Image (spheres, grey):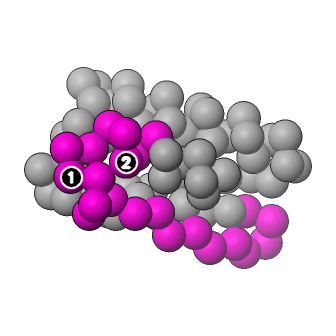
Amino acid sequence: MKELTQFLVKNLADHPDQASVQDSEADGTVTLKLVVAEEDKGKIIGKKGKVIKAIRSLVSAAGAKAQKKTVVDID
């Protein structure tokens, strides 16, 4: 899931070298924290949050396949 998220974020960002994903797991929930350049936040979130919703949907589907609940946050 982390690799999928990192692939998506780095391909969307204008500054892919500054984009990273930090993961942590607690109580069966995987939390993925996106760290991107300030200029890229709007691009990752998208108009009305459509891009981040799409990322969350993809990661959630991958998490369901691995039987884990996933949360994606942007920092």
As displayed, is residue 28 above or below residue 55? below
Of callouts 2 and 1, the N-terminal one: 2
Q: Residue at x 67, y 40 (%)?
A: 60
The residue tagged 2 is 10
- Residue 33 is a magenta residue: no
Q: In the displayed image of the protein, which residue is found farthest to the left?
A: 39
The residue tagged 1 is 15
Q: In which quarter of the image is residue 64?
A: top right
Q: Which residue is drawn at 49% across and 46% down?
A: 7
Instruction: Report how many numbered discs are placed on residues in the image.
Output: 2
**Residue 56 at x, y = what percent?**
54, 39
* Circle 1 Cα neighbour tier, 10 Å, few/some/many (<14 / 14–19 / ≥20): some
**Residue 27 at x, y = what percent?**
79, 72
Q: Residue at x 72, y 62 (%)?
A: 29
As displayed, is residue 20 above or below residue 11? below
Q: In the displayed image of the protein, which residue is found farthest to the front?
A: 17
Q: Which span of residues is magenta-colored?
A: 8-29
As displayed, is residue 71 above or below residue 29? above
Q: Do the residues labelled 2 and 1 touch (CB within 8 Å)?
A: no
Q: In this view, does 23 lie to the left or right of 63?
A: left
Q: Is mark 2 on a helix, strand or loop?
A: helix
Q: Residue at x 15, y 57 (%)?
A: 38
**Residue 35 at x, y = what percent?**
34, 63
As displayed, is residue 22 above or below residue 6? below
Q: Is residue 46 left or right of residue 62?
A: left
Instruction: Give the distance between the C-alpha atoms of the residues marked 2 and 1, in whole angstroms.
Output: 8 Å
Residue 45 visible in the shown view: no
Which residue type does callout 1 highlight? His
**Residue 2 at x, y = what percent?**
60, 57
Q: Which of 29 and 66 is in front in this view?
A: 66
